[in-house]
């Protein structure tokens, strides 16, 4: 993987969207995600990929969902080719977070760095191994900030 991709810092731009109902696959794989409506964001400017991101909840939801203003996470933007789903999706695995966010809630997020491009894996097990590597890379980036 190109170090240029990993070291590219993205514009400091917060995007707002709403949570949509997901299938629960992320939770079954051990990485529960919130699924987001990508159509109402300005993500067309970005390449499909897995990004380190920050996410924050509106003021009225902070205490309900978390006692932290901002959380880090891994954001996946693009198709889920491993599962033969080729329509672009937007989902975030939020680090150290275990709440269920209701569909319809609005959240803000910003992309920090591209971790890797999207990829089709031969099995869900291979995908899980890669997600673990992605989390480790993201944690190193956070630590070095």
Image (cartoon, rainbow, N blue to C red):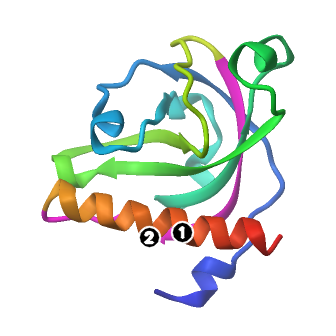
Region of the chain picked out in magenta, as a range: 106-122
Instruction: Determine whether the residue tagged by mark 2 lies in a helix, strand or loop.
Output: helix
Q: Residue at x 56, y 11 (%)?
A: 104
Q: Is residue 73 part of the magenta span, yes or no? A: no
Q: Is residue 113 part of the magenta span, yes or no? A: yes
Indicate whether 20 appears above or below 97. above
Disc 1 vs disc 2: Cβ atoms closer than 8 Å?
Answer: yes
Q: Residue at x 16, y 47 (%)?
A: 84
Q: Which mark is residue 117?
A: none
- Front residue of this view, candidates 57 and 100: 100
Mark 2 Cα-neighbour bin, 10 Å: few <14, some 14–19, many ≥20: few
Indicate whether 105 appears above or below 57. above
Residue bearing the label numbered 2: 133
- Front residue of this view, candidates 109 and 48: 109
Asked which quadrant contains residue 119, the reply is: bottom left
Asked which quadrant contains residue 4, the reply is: bottom right
Say whether residue 120 is visible: no
Mark 1 Cα-neighbour bin, 10 Å: few <14, some 14–19, many ≥20: few
Q: Which mark is residue 136?
A: 1
Q: Quadrant of the C terminus?
A: bottom right
* Residue 12, position as x, y percentages in the image: 84, 55
Say whether residue 55 is visible: yes
Instruction: Report the predominant secondary structure element of the magenta stretch.
Output: strand
Q: Residue at x 79, y 20 (%)?
A: 62
Q: Residue at x 19, y 54 (%)?
A: 124
* Residue 118, position as x, y percentages in the image: 38, 63
* Residue 74, position as x, y percentages in the image: 55, 52
* Residue 139, position as x, y percentages in the image: 64, 65
């Amino acid at each position: 993987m190109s170090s240029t991709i990993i070291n590219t810092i993205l514009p400091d731009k917060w995007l707002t969207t709403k949570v949509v109902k997901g299938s629960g696959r992320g939770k079954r794989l051990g990485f529960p995600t919130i699924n987001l409506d990508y159509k109402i964001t300005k993500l067309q400017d970005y390449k499909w990929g897995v990004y380190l991101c920050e996410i924050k909840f509106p003021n009225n939801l902070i205490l309900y969902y978390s006692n932290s203003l901002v959380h880090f996470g891994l954001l996946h933007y693009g198709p889920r080719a491993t599962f033969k789903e080729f329509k672009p999706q937007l989902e975030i695995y939020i680090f150290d977070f275990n709440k269920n966010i209701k569909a319809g809630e609005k959240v803000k997020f910003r992309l920090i760095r591209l971790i890797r491009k999207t990829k089709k894996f031969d099995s869900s097990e291979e995908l899980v191994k890669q997600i673990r590597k992605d989390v480790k890379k993201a944690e190193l980036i956070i630590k070095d900030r």
